[in-house]
Image (cartoon, grey):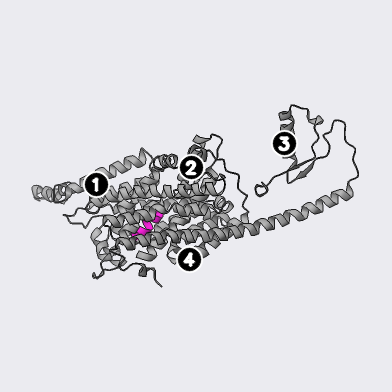
Amino acid sequence: MDILETLKTLWSGSGFYNFFMDGGYKNLIMIVISCALLYLGIKKKFEPLLLVGIAFGCLLVNISYFVSADSTNALYHPELWDQFLDHDSPYYHSYGNIMSNGGLLDILYIGVKTGLYPSLIFLGIGAMTDFGPLLSNPKSLLLGAAAQMGVFLAFFGAICIGFDGNQAASIGIIGGADGPTAIFLTSKLAPELLGPIAVAAYSYMALIPLIQPPLMRLLTTKKEREVKMEQTREVSKTEKIIFPIVVAVFIILLLPSTAPLIGCLMLGNLWKECGVTARLSDTVQNALMNIVTVFLGISVGATMVAGNFLSWRTLLIILLGLAAFAFSTIGGLLVGKLMYVLTGGKINPLIGSAGVSAVPMAARVSQNEGQKANPSNFLLMHAMGPNVAGVIGSAIAAGFLLAVFG
Amino acid sequence: MPIHVLVASVKDMRLGDAAVTAIFGYLVVFLGLTLLMTILYLMGAGFQAKAKRKQAVPAVAASEAAAESAPEQLLAPGSAGHVKLYDVPDKEAAMIMAIVANQMQKPLNELHFISIKEVKNDEV
């Protein structure tokens, strides 16, 4: 046995060797980025349940896949997914090719590509959400609609900058402040942007307590922020049971492309409210949700291959995502102000900013800002209405974009 | 009619097409949620009316039965008298009377309460 030759073979087959090959430095940069994301998730607690998985998925793919090297042992193969999307390839839409030639993360990524994981996450969200505040004050739906402004402004901005329609739609949905919806839409329309869009969406959701308050103070007067809202009516159990059925039927008939998200959201909620499926409700909001979060995080992170992620495009997506969040907040606040005027000062406009999904973080921000202006103010339950309306609103926005570009 | 007809080419959009798509999309979200709001208001109104009917029937029956069966009762010395309660539980009524007496700095037995009624939001 030639020890020197064996050592040479081992060295040339190692990842360390590939760092010095063509484009290998990019993998090093991605490793640094994944460590930074791990720091944000673990130390700063930025949406840790998903960000830690995303960051580790990014780390795994960038230490196992190098552009210039043999990718047999890689966990994720971007070229297989390029073939999957290429109309002229014999492997166009061939999951068989992925299953037989892909790595572990390729196989897990099938759940993202098919829209399975985001839909299952919505099942859990539905089972965890109380739509009572929305039912007791249906006007909240208008605030949830208004707070989708950022989605469409960012979409337009992305087109102006030079992104194509599918990519712009995927970037715009960051403004919906709803991670699973953003992943669902992007995996269908612009899978090449999934990494940066998921990172931007989850990072900004974690940063809502920093992004929203300055805008809230800028756009409202102290008098408006001090408004104490009246207690809304109690909602009966029967209403809560009928609600998911009505919403599913109505929204899916209106926009069939929303069926996976709205269908799962409402089924989860029905299990929660109907009172005879407590075991299922408990499973989807705990065990299933956790299992899917494991797969979703790691497989989204896997798409952050150095060659795709390290570009000016990523920086633009992150900036457009921030603009989308800001404009969504502004949209909700402006309609909140309009409602304040129309109701003779009975509605506190601060609840408008909670229309940007991000349940329940955005509602908590409204509560905190309201209480800063008036310590006896309790806006949380009032803000939960627009907050859950935002979830439905962003699913409709995604359904519209999917209908146009899908 | 497919929504694709909105734009000539959905991949590479012109700015005008993008603006129309953005405005139209925002309107679709508003329209969808406004229709849903209308449905929820109608649903809520139906349930509230049903709940009111349910509440009214036993309340009327109970007050009629009480009026027929209860003879005129003499008030105990120091009593604040009979108080008519509308949609207010006994405990809450007692608490309200105690608060009023405290605010007015008067002993409870010197005050005469005629009725206590819950004011609903829609009656304000």
Q: Which residue is mark 1?
A: A30
| Secondary structure state at the residue bearing disc 2 | helix
Q: Chain of mark 3?
A: B
Cα separation, mark 1 vs mark 4, equals 42 Å
- Determine crowd level at label 2: few under 14, some 14-19, many 20+ residues with C-alpha closer than 10 A: many
Q: Could you tell me the amino acid type at mark 4?
A: Leu
Question: Is A32 positioned to the left or the right of A264 in the image?
Answer: left
Q: Could you tell me the amino acid type at mark 1?
A: Met
- Determine crowd level at label 1: few under 14, some 14-19, many 20+ residues with C-alpha closer than 10 A: many
Q: Which residue is mark 3?
A: B96
Cα separation, mark 3 vs mark 1, equals 66 Å
Task: Identify the mark at residue A254; answer none if there is no mark.
Answer: 4
Cα separation, mark 1 vs mark 2, equals 36 Å
Q: Residue A223: percent from the left, percent from the top? A: 52, 38
Which residue is most to the bottom?
B1
Query: Which residue is at the front of the view, A224 or A284?
Result: A224
- Determine crowd level at label 3: few under 14, some 14-19, many 20+ residues with C-alpha closer than 10 A: few
Figure quadrant of the C terminus of chain A = bottom left
Q: Could you tell me the amino acid type at mark 2?
A: Ser
Q: Which range of residues does the magenta coloring cover?
A: A178-187
| Secondary structure state at the residue bearing disc 1 | helix
Label located before the other in sequence (4 or 2): 4
Q: Chain of mark 4?
A: A
Specify whether residue A1 is painted magenta: no
Cα separation, mark 4 vs mark 3, equals 50 Å
**Quadrant in the picture for residue A135:** bottom right
Q: Which residue is mark 2?
A: A366
- The secondary structure that dominates the magenta segment is helix
**Quadrant in the picture for residue A73:** bottom left
